[in-house]
Image (cartoon, rainbow, N blue to C red):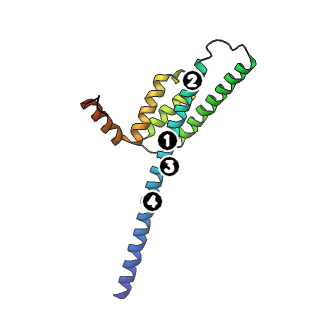
Amino acid sequence: MEALYIILGATLALGGGVLTHHVQLYYAQQKEENNLLFEIERSLLEIGGLDSELNHFKTEPDTLDTKAKVARYREQKSSQLENLHLLAIRIISDKNRSIAVKVAKYSIDKHHRTDENRYVLLKLVQQSMNSKLLKQYQKETDTNPTVF
């Protein structure tokens, strides 16, 4: 009888260890995905800032300093787009897969790189990261938009 209790205790301990491992793995994955989404949001905002700076130079720059500045902005934007693609690849959950696909499309295909698509991506990322806050904000804005 004592041996049965020992085997039962060992089995319960092993099961608890496996369960704890899977729960920790799940929460670690969620934390990693939230960090990835935060980095995607940061990159999208950075790309928007770089686009804004590049829009100041609609015509071909005249001076070498201006040409160097434009080249630097374009290089930074290219780097951010590559970073976006690499971040999108690392998202593996079903919940955020559609966001990852849209981010990959935005970063790879030039015809998808519009301000409207960037705003849509920002909104999707923010909803995925903190949907409760956005729902409460929307509710308060809808009921009385003038009150702070």
Element under label 3?
helix
* CB-based contact (under 8 Å), mark 3 and mark 1: no
Q: Residue at x 60, y 21 (%)?
A: 54
- Residue 29: horizontal and vertical position, in percent? 47, 51
Q: Residue furthest left?
A: 143
Element under label 4?
helix
CA gap between label 3 and label 1 equals 10 Å
Q: Residue at x 43, y 40 (%)?
A: 96
* CB-based contact (under 8 Å), mark 3 and mark 4: no
- Residue 146: horizontal and vertical position, in percent? 29, 28
Three-letter residue code for mark 2 = Asp
The label on residue 32 is 3
Discs 3/1, front: 1
Discs 2/4, front: 2
Q: Which residue is mark 4?
A: 24
CA gap between label 3 and label 4 equals 12 Å
Q: Is residue 47 above or below residue 18?
A: above
